[in-house]
Image (spheres, helix red, strand yellow):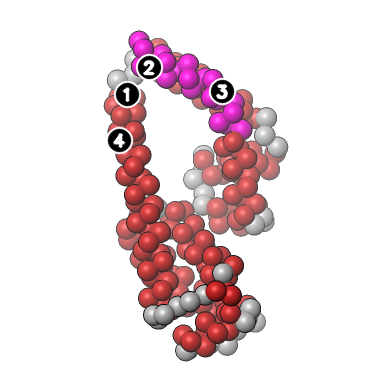
Amino acid sequence: MKPDKINDDAELVRKLKNNDEDAMIILYQNYWRGLYISAFKILKDKEACEDIIQDLFIKIWNNRDSLNITSSVQGYLSASVRYEVYRKIREVKKHEPIINDLMEIVADLSVSDLLEYKELQTQISQVIDTLPEKCKEVYHLSRNELLSHKEISEKLSISPNTVRNHLTRALHQLRIGLTQIVLIILSFIFFR
């Protein structure tokens, strides 16, 4: 059943503070699409935008008791999304010089370097093969088929949080399993 529409911002906030789940549904239904579109215009990254919007609404629900919206709900939500988008851009820009350096290194790779890369890919596959079946499946859908958390969640009939947990576990295992190999490869690249 679709909840009744609430047109007044003050009433919506009041109902949220009173733990009204219908008010949360209305808030989400009224604003998620516009927020997503505004974030996507800047980031051009579907998954990052979905995560930003989902995290915003979760944060609102979790902090509903202390919710203090002094402007319009639209203004509050837009400012929150804008802040997260800029934070994401700063995060990417911080890593940009490293990525550029790595791209230059990759462009200069020789045949033997490419063989090292293939070996790294083999090692990654071996680490992934040690994961539990569902975790392995989530990792494959995310990294190889480039599905978003939401798409994986729907495809496997699990929650987006479970998807996130599986990916966190897989990446943790990869970090542990590949640390030594990466150090060897980096020493090979930088000290050849």
For disc 3, the marked residue is: 123
Q: Amino acid at mark 1?
A: Ile
Mark found first going from the N terminus, 3 or 1 = 1
Relative horizontal placement of residue 81, taking residue 19 as reference (left or right): left
Residue 22 vs residue 68, the one in the foreground: 68
Q: Say if 24 sits above or below 106 in the image.
A: below
Q: Quarter of the image holding residue 112?
A: top left
Q: Amino acid at mark 4?
A: Pro
Q: Nearer the viewer, mark 3 or mark 2?
A: 2
The residue positioned 46% from the left and 59% from the top of the image is 52
Relative horizontal placement of residue 19, taking residue 76 as reference (left or right): right
For disc 2, the marked residue is: 189
Q: Position of residue 121 (x, y in %)?
A: 51, 25
Mark found first going from the N terminus, 3 or 2 = 3
For disc 1, the marked residue is: 105
Cα–Cα gap, marks 3 and 2: 18 Å
Cα–Cα gap, marks 1 and 4: 12 Å
Q: Are marks 2 and 1 in contact (CB under 8 Å)?
A: yes
Cα–Cα gap, marks 2 and 4: 17 Å
Q: Nearer the viewer, mark 1 or mark 4?
A: 4
Q: Which residues are magenta?
A: 173-192
Residue 140 vs residue 36, the one in the foreground: 36
